Image (cartoon, grey):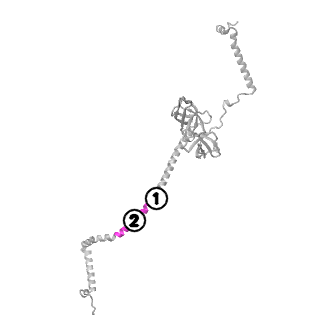
């Protein structure tokens, strides 16, 4: 059996000749395209025809890039969101602190103005915490006996009375608020000067005017101020405002409810008035009997003088009665 090459290789030029011819043709096309741009239209036509195929070939790569960009952008957005949230929390905290400082500054300015208006010495104090007894209305202040605080001294804010110092320690003190159920304060109605005593109502935060008659001249919105008759609270400090007056003809006493004007539950800075907790004894408290010799001698003279005047007044009656005196004012009618 004779082996012979396929017919394709038996006809035409050799492979070397074909390579030379193709090389020369490629060089000619390159020279023609670079010199006279003869293949520009052909290149554009071929590029346009191959563009859909290129896009189809690039679709897997573009899809992969989009997926990678999506997850990377999602991670970036989450990080930015967490950063913005933390910054927002910090800004909110700073804003709250700024608002708190503004409110505290405003309150301190008001207290400073009230301190300048007072005619007695006072010291500024801050509330540390509430007392442990939940049924009592008491707070602990950061001033004590080392700063001149004593039991019985009144505590005020820029609006009025807050309470009274009831216990003193070296560096702290306990203040019983005005609304405590065991607290009472002498007051008077600013409109007409009517005197009374206000009692605390405990957790309700209000005051009562007890033992006031049903026909007492007290109206709603009347302002109650300290009367000063107790010798502890300076006179004229605002205490409360009447919010309800209930009186019935069948009741002996009226039911009067008052609301404190001071910020008892709103402020942390207060003023403690440094008044003398032991006022000077009143005249009624002084001894009424004196055993000195001069006082006894003066009393004896006063008694004798009073007796002589009484006897002189009785003489006209013995000598002719009052008519004789009227007729003879110079003593002419006396025999």
Between 103 and 285, the residue placed more toward the observer is: 285
Residue stretch rendered in magenta on the structure: 59-80
Whether residue 286 is situated above or below residue 324 in the rendered picture: below
Instruction: Say which residue appears at 74% left-offset and 23% top-offset.
Output: 297
Please report contact status of discs 2 and 1: CB closer than 8 Å, yes or no: no
Q: Nearer the viewer, residue 9 or 206?
A: 206
Residue 68 belongs to magenta span:
yes
* Rendered image: mark on residue 100: none
Which residue is outermost to the right?
293
Q: Earlier in the sequence, mark 2 or mark 1?
A: 2
Tag 2: Cα neighbours inside 10 Å, few (<14), some, or many (≥20)?
A: few
Spatial separation of the CA atoms under disc 2 and disc 1 = 20 Å
One can see residue 91 in this view? yes
272 horizontally vs 93: left or right: right
Q: Where is the C terminus found, in terms of image quarters? A: top right
Crowding near pointer 1: few (<14 within 10 Å), some, many (20+)? few
The image shows residue 204 at horizontal and vertical percentages of 55, 41
Q: Position of residue 279 (x, y in %)?
A: 65, 35
The residue sitting at the front extreme is 250
- Looking at the picture, does residue 188 appear above or below residue 24? above
Whether residue 20 is in magenta: the answer is no
Q: Secondary structure at mark 2?
A: helix
Query: Which SS class for mark 1?
Result: helix
In the rendered structure, find residue 82 and report the number of the disc placed on it: 1
Q: What secondary structure do most residues of the magenta stretch adopt?
A: helix
Q: Which residue is mark 2?
A: 69
Residue 84: horizontal and vertical position, in percent? 45, 57
Query: Of 119 and 185, which appears nearest the observer?
Result: 185
């Amino acid at each position: 059996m004779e082996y012979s090459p396929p017919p394709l290789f038996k006809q035409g030029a050799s492979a070397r000749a074909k390579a030379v011819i193709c090389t020369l043709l490629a060089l000619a096309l390159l020279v023609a395209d670079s010199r006279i741009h003869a293949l520009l239209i052909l290149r554009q036509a071929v590029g346009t025809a191959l563009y859909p195929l290129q896009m189809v070939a690039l679709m897997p790569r573009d899809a992969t890039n989009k997926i990678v960009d999506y997850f990377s952008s999602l991670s970036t957005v989450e990080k930015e969101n967490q950063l913005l949230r933390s910054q927002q929390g910090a800004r909110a905290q700073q804003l709250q602190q700024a608002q708190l400082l503004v409110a505290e500054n405003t309150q301190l300015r008001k207290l400073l103005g009230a301190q300048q208006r007072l005619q007695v010495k006072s010291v500024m104090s801050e509330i540390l915490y509430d007392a442990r007894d939940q049924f009592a209305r008491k707070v602990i202040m950061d001033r004590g006996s080392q700063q001149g605080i004593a039991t019985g001294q009144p505590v005020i804010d820029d609006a009025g009375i807050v309470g009274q110092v009831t216990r003193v320690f070296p560096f702290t003190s306990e203040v019983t608020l005005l609304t405590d159920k065991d607290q009472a304060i002498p007051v008077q109605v600013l409109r007409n000067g009517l005197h009374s005593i206000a009692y605390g109502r405990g957790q309700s935060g209000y005051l009562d005017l007890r033992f006031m008659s049903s026909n007492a001249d007290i109206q709603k919105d009347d302002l109650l101020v300290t009367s000063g008759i107790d010798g502890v609270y300076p006179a004229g400090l605002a205490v409360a405002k009447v919010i309800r007056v209930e009186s019935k003809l069948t009741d002996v006493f009226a039911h009067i409810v008052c609301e404190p004007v001071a910020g008892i539950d709103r402020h942390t800075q207060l003023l403690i008035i440094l008044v003398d907790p032991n006022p000077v004894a009143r005249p009624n408290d002084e001894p009424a009997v004196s055993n000195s010799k001069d006082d006894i001698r003066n009393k004896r003279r006063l008694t004798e003088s009073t007796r002589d005047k009484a006897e002189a007044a009785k003489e006209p009656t013995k000598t002719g009665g009052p008519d004789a005196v009227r007729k003879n004012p110079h003593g002419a009618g006396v025999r």
